[in-house]
Amino acid sequence: MARKDMARFEISDLPLGGLKRIERSVLEDDRGSLSRLFCADELREAGWGKPVAQLNHTRTVARGTVRGLHFQRPPHMEMKLVSCIRGAVWDVAVDLREGSPTLLHWHAEELSSNNHRALLIPEGFAHGFQALTDDAELIYVHSSAYNPGSEAGLHPEDPRLEIAWPQPVRALSGRDASHPYITHSFRGLPK
């Protein structure tokens, strides 16, 4: 039986099909606070139907740094739940699904340790973020384990995407800076 005072999720649809904002409730008392980062039962209604395959933690030292835009090709596509546990980031998801009416459209949400939001990113999306503060930390829950042969990425400054990064892009990794721009022949990722 669920406790009435247990931390819960509020799940909201976003403009790109399958992309969800997750708002975590926080229970606080004189000892501190508690919030859930992942709950399979609650996230099932948002589309999470696989077991957790991997959990990652990132720390980004400098404000303005961009990481991404990363994705895995079939058959290793992954769903991600991204939460900010320190500082703040501007988290971006790009629809890469073949046949999607929002192919190559992006959506961003500010995630922070203060707003208790997470982004649930479906399979077939690229993901990246820009640190809005120094020492930003994220926790990622993945539905598929990392597969080096399936990894790919988009250049975060690709003019076809026109991502409006809130700060000047800085400190791209060599790998992220070398991702190619999208060609006009790109039709999306098959399911």
Image (spheres, rainbow, N blue to C red):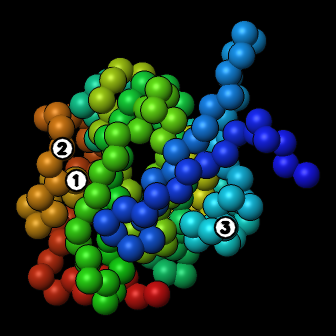
- Measuring from the top left, give residue 150's x and y in whole percent: 48, 72
Q: Answer yes or no: is residue 59 visible.
A: no
Which residue is tagged 2? 165
Please name the amino acid that badge 3 sits on: Arg
What separation in Å lies between label 2 and label 1 (alpha carbons)?
9 Å
| Residue for badge 3 | 44
Residue 128 seen in the figure: yes
In the rendered view, does 6 fall on the left or right side of 18?
right
Which of the 4 quarters of the picture holds residue 185? bottom left
| Marks 1 and 3, how far apart at CA | 31 Å
Quadrant hosting residue 154: bottom left
* Residue at 55 percent of width and 75 percent of height: 76
User: Quick check: 140 above or below 26?
Assistant: below
Specify few, some or many for label 2: CA neighbours under 10 Å numbering under 14, 14-19, or 20 or more: some
Residue 34 image offset from top left, x and y in percent? 70, 29
- Name above or below for residue 102 compared with residue 135: below
Q: Please tell me the numbered disc located at residue 156.
A: 1
Q: Is residue 103 above or below residue 23?
A: below
Mark before the other along the chain sequence, 2 or 3: 3
Nearer to us in this view, 190 or 180: 190
Q: Residue furthest top?
A: 30
Which residue appears at 58% of the width and 41% of the height?
24
Is 12 situated above or below 55?
below
Residue with the most extreme front position: 4
Which amino acid does the dot numbered 1 rest on?
Pro
